[in-house]
Amino acid sequence: MNRKKFLTSASVATLASFRVTSLLNEAVTGAKKPIPIIDTHQHIIDFERFGEDWSHPPVAGNFNEREYEKAIKGLNIIKAVYCEVAVPTDKRHEEALYAIELCKDKTNPTVAAVIKGDLYTSDFEEYMSEFKNSPYVKGIRGSFSSREGVLNDHVVKNVRVLGEMNLSLDISVQPAWLHSIPDLIRLCPDTKFILEHCGNVDPRAFLKPDALLGEPDHDRDQWIADMKAIASERNVACGISGVVTRSPGYPLTVDNLAPAIDQCLDIFGPDRVMFASDWPWCLKSMELRGWLDILKSVVANRSYQDQKKLFHDNALKFYNI
């Protein structure tokens, strides 16, 4: 082989080796790259703004935006979604404007809001029309008066209105009411839904019987069946939170919480789950950092791509933020 051919051959081999090494390094370092996090469910409870005695967080304090920033310091939470905080009815509109005010302030991580709306009222569409084109209001959090009330005519009509306005509906119901939710979702196919707090699962339902833990407050198999029925509708996602907030007194360890969390992740799949802190209600049991560390440990063996969807990508797409 002459010198020119040798150098050409050596260069090609070196380049090929460099590419292979780069790909290997990318695979290794990529798996360790910190994932930016979007918190899809935080509560800013500002008693200085809205007065006292209308909310009762699990610990004393004023949980305004600055306190939230302290809670997430060093956690790589880059964006957050404000979730309504059950202010008195006559202050709901003021709360919505306050949430928008927070979102406009680029010095804090709150970039979107889920406000309160009464699904049983006849003037719901008129009320929501003010926020129809807001780049910050992404949906409402609704509540139901009863299991039967989930399918109330006003409710169905107003949930459809949300879809027409490109707004979503956050719902949190006790496990006994989950059975009614698929019917509502089917009746409103153009509306996006978020099932909050892992369907309010009781983690004890997925643990071996233990007198120290006590009895779960719902049937395991029925909960699974209801969650699968909800997940079969493609316009619904699941918020991964709540399992430390409900805390009925047993040890909140990775081993105790993982089975219930894994059920939600597997039932809804990697493209329809989103991390949520439920701060400051998580403080009933632990700091936000503690809950985040538990969830990271639960999903540690899942692919980097699926973890990134859970903590960031799905929220980015769902809320268009």
Image (cartoon, rainbow, N blue to C red):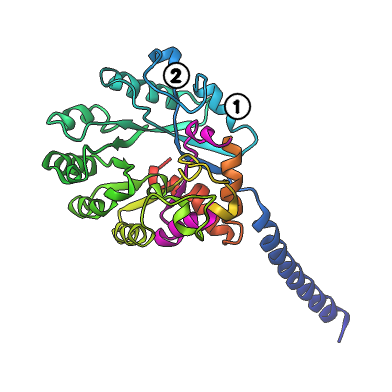
Please tell me which residue lies in front, 83 or 203. Answer: 203
Say whether marks 2 and 1 touch (CB < 8 Å). Answer: no
Image position of 106 with respect to 251: above or below: above
- Residue 231 lies, in percent from the top left, at 33, 58
- Residue 295 lies, in percent from the top left, at 56, 49
Residue 135 picture quarter: top left
Instruction: Name the side, left or right, on which 19 lies relative to 209.
Output: right
Q: Secondary structure at mark 1?
A: helix
Q: Is residue 193 among the parts visible in the rendering?
A: yes
Residue at 32% x, 45% y is 174
Q: Is residue 134 among the parts visible in the rendering?
A: no
Work out which residue is located at the far bottom of the displayed protein and give it: 1
Instruction: Name the side, left or right, on which 11 lies relative to 152.
Output: right
Residue at 86% x, 87% y is 1
Residue at 36% x, 60% y is 224
Query: Can residue 263 be found in the magenta stretch?
Result: yes
Which residues are the magenta region?
A: 257-286
Instruction: Name the side, left or right, on which 239 lies relative to 35.
Output: left
Residue 134 picture quarter: top left
Instruction: Name the side, left or right, on which 267 lies relative to 296.
Output: left
**Lower position in the chain sequence, tag 2 or tag 1:** 2
What residue sits right under mark 2 in the picture?
A: 46
| Disc 1: CA contacts within 10 A as few (<14), some (14-19) or many (>=20) | few
- Residue 49 lies, in percent from the top left, at 41, 14
Image position of 88 with respect to 35: above or below: above
Disc number at residue 70? 1
Q: Secondary structure at mark 2?
A: loop
| Disc 2: CA contacts within 10 A as few (<14), some (14-19) or many (>=20) | some
Quadrant for the C terminus, please. top left
